[in-house]
Image (cartoon, grey):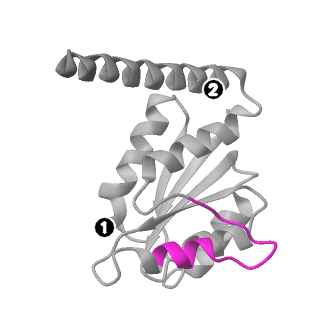
């Protein structure tokens, strides 16, 4: 199975990124977590991305706040899919990070989830890997069935309030 790289621009992003790590663990997907900055360690970020495929990664998740160029820098140096997690900051509630992550030039896409939506980033990574892994596809299907059952049960519980 291919690994998922989880790269964050700062260790202060880890409380959010932890949700992606937990979700990858839940699906038994191997991963690595690193801190790299698009602005402070651009050479390391570029080299990591350039060699990610040969290092058995299948997807890269990039979490960054404010100017949030990390996803774009990584995407510019690899053909692997990159998923951006815009991280909420004090200044603009994460809108700056969202727009920095999602507004990419043609040919350098970064799939972008919602602000602080690390669990969804991990699920999207698992979906990408599941295209060539039947066991992951089955696990995702089971997750969807479980989610639906949970909602149905909540509806039944709610209906008891109106009998």
Q: Quick check: is 80 in the magenta stretch?
A: no
Figure check: 158 above or below 5: above
Q: Quadrant of residue 112?
A: bottom right
Residue at (80, 76) in percent of width and height: 106
Q: Which mark is residue 48?
A: none
Please report the bounds of the magenta region as a residue range.
Answer: 97-112
Q: Is residue 124 left or right of residue 143?
A: right
Q: How many circles with numbers are drawn on the protein?
A: 2
Q: Residues within 10 Å of mark 2 (few under 14, many from 20)?
A: many
Disc 1 element: helix
Residue holding disc 1: 12
- Which of 39 and 156 lies nearest the eye of the viewer? 156
| Picture coordinates of residue 105, whole percent (x, y) | 74, 79
- Which of 93 and 124 lies nearest the eye of the viewer? 93
Q: Residues within 10 Å of mark 1 (few under 14, many from 20)?
A: few
Between disc 2 and disc 1, whose residue precedes? Answer: 1
Figure check: 70 above or below 147: below
Q: Quick check: is 102 in the magenta stretch?
A: yes
Q: Can I make out residue 69 in this image?
A: no
Figure check: 96 above or below 21: below
Label 2 to label 1, Cα distance in Å? 30 Å
Figure check: 94 above or below 50: below
Residue holding disc 2: 136
- Which of 26 and 105 lies nearest the eye of the viewer? 105
Location of the C terminus by quadrant is top left
| Picture coordinates of residue 19, whole percent (x, y) | 37, 46
Disc 2 element: helix
């Amino acid at each position: 199975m291919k690994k998922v790289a989880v790269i964050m621009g700062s260790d202060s992003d880890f409380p959010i990124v932890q949700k992606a790590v937990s979700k990858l663990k839940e699906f038994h997907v191997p991963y690595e977590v690193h801190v790299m900055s698009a602005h402070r360690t651009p050479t390391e970020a570029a080299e990591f991305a350039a060699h990610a495929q040969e290092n058995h990664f299948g997807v890269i998740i990039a979490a960054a706040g404010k100017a949030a160029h990390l996803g774009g820098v990584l995407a510019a140096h690899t053909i692997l899919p990159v998923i951006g997690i815009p991280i909420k900051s004090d200044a603009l509630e994460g809108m700056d990070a969202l727009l920095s992550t999602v507004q990419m030039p043609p040919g350098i896409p970064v799939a972008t989830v919602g602000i602080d939506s690390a669990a969804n980033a991990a699920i999207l990574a698992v979906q990408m890997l599941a295209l060539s892994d039947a066991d992951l596809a089955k696990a995702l299907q089971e997750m969807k069935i479980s989610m639906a059952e949970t909602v149905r049960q909540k509806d039944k519980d709610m209906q008891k309030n109106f009998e």
